[in-house]
Amino acid sequence: MIRKAKLTDAKAIYNLINFWAKENKLLERSLNYIYEHIRDFWVDEEKKKIVGCCSLVVVGWEDLAEIKSLAVDKKYQNKNIGTELVKNCLFEAKTLGIKKVFALTFIPEFFEKLGFKVIKREDLPHKIWSDCINCVHFPNCKEEAVIFKL
């Protein structure tokens, strides 16, 4: 069941994100970061276990948001959990009046299936690169930027 995250989900979200961070697929997040941004997160809970998460972060401009930390437990992949998490973020963005949602990803094909378009990373505002400084791939990033216009 997909729902908004609660404080009691923070440790499970932390473990899920950082599992993939150790695989160099996501940017590591501290437990403190997750607590501070818990309202941004959506989770998928199956049998009382958090098996997926994703966050929608408004990016300081009135019409732009970013999907961050999309992660699905290995045992639960290929079950549309990631798709449904992203769809919930897009719905939330629309209700907030956001016009564009972007993501930085190693798997642009996943987002393209949902209607996102690949764009040049340079087309995004410079402010979004503040997270990149902490990434193991910086400055040789292999992620691609994708955007969805609502």
Image: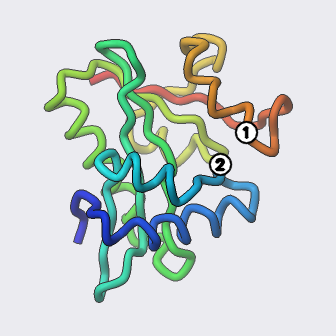
Tell me if mark 2 has few (under 14), some (14-19) or many (20+) residues whose alpha carbon lies within 10 angstroms of its own.
many
Q: How many marks?
A: 2
Q: Residue 87, image x and y in percent?
A: 29, 47
Who is closer to the viewer here, 10 or 112? 10
Q: Secondary structure at mark 2?
A: loop
Q: In the image, what residue occupies the spot 25% across and 32% down?
A: 93
Q: Label 1's element?
A: helix
The quarter of the picture where residue 56 lies is top left
The reply to whether callout 2 and callout 1 are in contact (CB within 8 Å) is: yes
Find disc 2 in the rendering and name its residue.
27
Foreground tag (2 vs 1):
1
**On-image quarter of the N terminus:** bottom left
Q: Which mark is residue 4?
A: none
Type of amino acid under label 2: Leu
Label 1 Cα neighbours within 10 Å, binned few <14 / some 14-19 / many ≥20:
few
Residue for point 39% across, 42% down: 114
Q: Where 82 falls versus 109 (above or below)?
A: below
User: From the viewer's perspective, is 37 left or right of 2?
Assistant: right
* 127 to 71, vertically: above or below: above
* Residue 134, numbered circle: 1
The part of the image, by quadrant, that contains residue 137 is: top right
Q: Position of 59 compared to 87: left or right?
A: right
Q: Name the kind of residue labelled 1 in the image.
A: Asn
Q: Report x, y in % for residue 123.
A: 58, 11
Residue 84 falls left or right of residue 119: left
- Residue at 22% across, 62% down: 3
* Residue 113 placement (x, y as % from top left): 44, 44
